[in-house]
Image: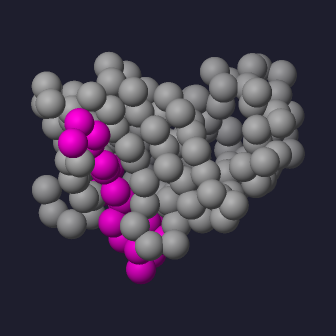
């Protein structure tokens, strides 16, 4: 793996870190591919019993790298399908991991990064954590994990209003 995703094993725990701190760990194509590889590595390693997913620097992740996307925007369904599949697969690799997964959030976990955190079994955050799906403000409801977390009615409220929230507020709504 390159340095877009760091993989470290501490005792029986694999620590996977998003590593683009200069871009608030904005996820690009390479990072998504490396996330999949890291999840698969943890899954296959019999000495790993749990996985912690976190971000380097001051953020978990600001979401997908919109600057990179704008520089090479897919055109039509044939170009969009592999992009969406890669995004989905990276998130679902943590959802389907047979070992316990923990999202250790600090700073923003927005859009696709919020989905990634929600795909983990346990979500923890320090007081700087901000969870949100700001793309909902653009009438783009692409959340595939949120309905499982909060139920369809709460998901619709979030989709129609757009939201960012603190960990304390999320705890009141998710528990």
Residue closer to the observer: 28 or 47: 47
Residue 101, visible in the rendered structure: yes
Please name the residue shown 56% across and 60% down the image: 106
Q: Position of residue 77 (x, y in %)?
A: 43, 39
In the picture, residue 134 is in which quadrant?
Answer: bottom right
Please name the residue shown 27% across and 58% down the image: 5
Residue 78, visible in the rendered structure: no
In the picture, residue 160 is in which quadrant?
Answer: top right
> On the rendered image, what quadrant is the C terminus found in?
top right
| Left or right for 71, reference 148 | left
Q: Position of residue 90 (x, y in %)?
A: 36, 39
Q: Position of residue 174 (x, y in %)?
A: 75, 31
In the picture, residue 128 is in which quadrant?
Answer: bottom right
Residue closer to the observer: 116 or 12: 12
Scheme of image coloration: one colour
| Left or right for 113, reference 90 | right
Rendered view: 131 above or below 78: below
Rendered view: 95 above or below 60: above
Give the magenta range. Answer: 11-32
Rendered view: 17 above or below 38: below
Check the image and name the residue furthest to the front. 11
Question: Residue 85 lies in magenta, yes or no?
Answer: no
Please name the residue shown 44% across and 73% down the image: 57
Q: Position of residue 166 (x, y in %)?
A: 76, 54
> On the rendered image, what quadrant is the N terminus found in?
bottom left
| Left or right for 103, reference 148 | left
Check the image and name the residue furthest to the bottom. 22
Please name the residue shown 49% across and 44% down the image: 103
Number of numbered discs visible in the structure rendering: 0
């Amino acid at each position: 793996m390159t340095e877009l995703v760091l993989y470290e094993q501490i005792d029986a725990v694999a620590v996977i870190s998003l590593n683009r701190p200069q871009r608030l760990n904005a996820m690009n194509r390479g990072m998504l591919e490396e996330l999949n590889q890291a999840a698969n590595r943890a899954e296959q390693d019999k000495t790993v019993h749990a996985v912690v997913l976190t971000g380097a620097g001051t953020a978990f992740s600001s979401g997908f790298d919109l600057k990179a996307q704008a520089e090479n925007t897919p055109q039509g369904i044939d170009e969009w399908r592999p992009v969406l599949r890669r995004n989905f697969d990276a998130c679902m690799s943590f959802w389907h991991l047979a070992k316990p997964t923990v999202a250790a959030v600090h700073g923003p976990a927005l859009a696709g990064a919020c989905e990634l955190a929600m795909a983990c079994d346990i979500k923890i955050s320090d007081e700087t954590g901000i969870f949100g799906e700001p793309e909902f403000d653009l009438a783009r409801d692409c959340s595939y994990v949120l309905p499982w977390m909060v139920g369809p009615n709460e998901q619709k409220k979030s989709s129609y209003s757009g939201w960012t929230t603190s960990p304390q507020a999320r705890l009141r709504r998710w528990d």
